[in-house]
Image: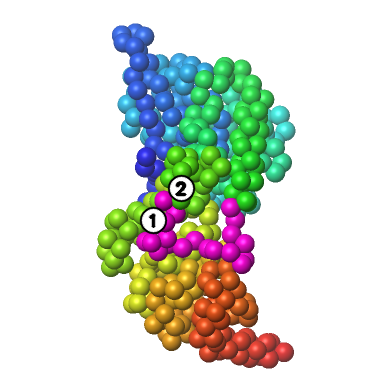
């Protein structure tokens, strides 16, 4: 299923806030005709809003009666009409009034004042009280528990309405048929959130067991390694490790997709937009290991000419996160140390190019070069790779010392 930008005015294909498009079907006929929004709970989860808010909004905007418990709007309304109406809800009740970021919570201030608390820019903006939905929300405010993750940390960033646990448990419409009536029982939603939180914690514990220790094998994305792991997983009946959908399987699926699309030829890789969409589809957008995978798959012996075309994709995925930078560096270490040893002599130039394009920071490179590690390759190869990188690391250290002297 493809996803669309939450703010449809933003046409950037790398826009990180996604949601599933509205899906609807018409039920009944004559005066009893109704429109059912079949994936409303997924859309609501991506927007971090209760489904009842969306149903009531559609009713007010389209001048129709609604049935919250079944996500029904009286009358025949096509999908485009509903999607356009949803844009109005997003603009009025989701997007920050200052930075237009959808990472907001609705807060009831006092008895009848609704505010949007933006987790991105920190601004608190007032919601326009003129819309009829305003009164409904005042009477049925969301319960924003302290410490509760916003939509960015759960649904919309990683796949338009589905968290890792949703996908693993096969949950699409967790609130569908949840018995929500006109007098919204907020506690029912809290219970669903608690159940979801427990599932996330359980899966996190399972994934923790799979985490790669510093002295163990990393994500090997060579064609031979992918095939070998596929054979190992055959005995699991396709259910994944410990009976759940593991991130390891998803990395293999991503690797197999790249091999299939490119014929294992870097020059024929899908474009960066398609690669990004596949990462979102596989729910790997929040995984630092995806940078390690890309470090091994986007480049070959012509890496110095191939870095620039992928700067946009890598910058978007790294997102100024040091762990993501380390993971990318680990992928490059495997690429150069195992796949293309002939590139070892060019490593200073390669690192300088990634540094010059703000993909890997000075601190990360210096720390990486300060000690041998068996995390991504064997100790001997790690030592050889770092030795070849020494001239560039020394240049960074000298530049840093000069900068400190100037400050003094």
Q: CA distance from mark 1 to mark 2?
A: 10 Å
Residue 371, above or below 325: below
Residue 389, above or below 295: below
> Which mark, by number, is residue 233?
2
Region rendered in magenta: 210-231
Q: Which numbered disc, 1 or 2, marks the residue that appears first in the sequence?
A: 1
Q: Residue at x 61, y 17 (%)?
A: 183
x and y percentages locating residue 266 in the rendered image: 31, 67
Left or right: 29 in relation to 207: left
- The residue at which mark 1 appears reads as 227
x and y percentages locating residue 175 in the rendered image: 54, 26
The C terminus is located in which quarter? bottom right
x and y percentages locating residue 166 in the rendered image: 52, 37
**For this rendering, which residue is in front, 247 or 305?**
247
**For this rendering, which residue is in front, 160 or 264?**
264
x and y percentages locating residue 249 in the rendered image: 46, 49
Q: Residue at x 59, y 59 (%)?
A: 212
Residue 313, above or below 87: below
Q: How many C-alpha atoms fall within 10 Å of the one at disc 2: few (<14), some, or many (≥20)?
A: some
Q: Residue at x 59, y 49 (%)?
A: 207
Picture quarter containing residue 111?
top right
Q: Residue at x 34, y 57 (%)?
A: 258
**For this rendering, which residue is in front, 283 or 143?**
283
């Amino acid at each position: 299923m493809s996803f669309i930008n939450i703010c449809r005015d933003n046409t950037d294909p790398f826009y990180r806030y996604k949601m599933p498009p509205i899906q609807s079907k018409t039920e009944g006929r004559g005066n009893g005709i109704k429109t059912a929004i079949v994936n409303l709970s997924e859309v609501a989860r991506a927007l971090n809003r209760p489904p009842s808010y969306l149903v009531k909004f559609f009713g007010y905007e389209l001048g129709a009666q609604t049935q919250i418990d079944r996500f029904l709007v009286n009358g025949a309304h096509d999908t485009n009409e509903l999607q356009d109406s949803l844009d109005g809800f997003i603009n009025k009740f989701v997007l920050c009034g200052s930075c237009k970021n959808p990472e907001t919570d609705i807060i009831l201030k006092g008895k009848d004042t609704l505010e949007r608390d933006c987790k991105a820019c920190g601004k608190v903006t007032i919601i326009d009280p003129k819309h009829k939905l305003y009164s409904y929300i005042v009477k049925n405010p969301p319960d924003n528990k302290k410490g509760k993750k916003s939509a960015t940390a759960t649904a919309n960033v990683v796949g338009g309405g589905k968290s890792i646990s949703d996908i693993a448990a096969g949950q699409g419409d967790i609130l569908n048929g949840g018995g929500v009536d006109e007098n919204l029982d907020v506690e029912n939603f809290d219970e669903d959130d608690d159940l979801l939180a427990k599932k996330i914690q359980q899966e996190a514990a399972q994934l923790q067991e799979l985490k790669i220790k510093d002295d163990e094998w990393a994500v090997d994305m060579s064609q031979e390694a992918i095939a070998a792991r596929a054979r190992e997983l055959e005995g699991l009946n396709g259910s994944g490790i410990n009976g759940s959908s593991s991130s390891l399987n998803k990395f293999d699926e991503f690797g197999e997709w790249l091999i299939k699309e490119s014929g294992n030829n870097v020059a024929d890789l899908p474009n960066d937009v398609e690669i990004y969409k596949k990462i979102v589809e596989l729910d790997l957008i929040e995984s630092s290991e995806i940078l390690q995978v890309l470090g091994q798959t986007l480049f070959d012996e012509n890496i110095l000419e191939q870095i620039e075309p992928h700067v946009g994709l890598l910058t978007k995925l790294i997102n100024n996160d040091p762990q993501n930078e380390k993971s990318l560096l680990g992928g490059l270490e495997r690429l150069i140390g195992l796949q293309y040893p002939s590139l070892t002599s060019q490593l200073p130039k390669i690192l300088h190019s990634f540094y010059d394009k703000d993909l890997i920071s000075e601190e990360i490179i210096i720390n990486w070069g300060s000690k041998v590690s068996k995390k991504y390759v064997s100790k001997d190869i790690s030592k050889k790779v770092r030795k070849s990188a020494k001239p560039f690391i020394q240049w960074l250290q000298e530049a840093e010392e000069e900068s400190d002297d100037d400050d003094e």
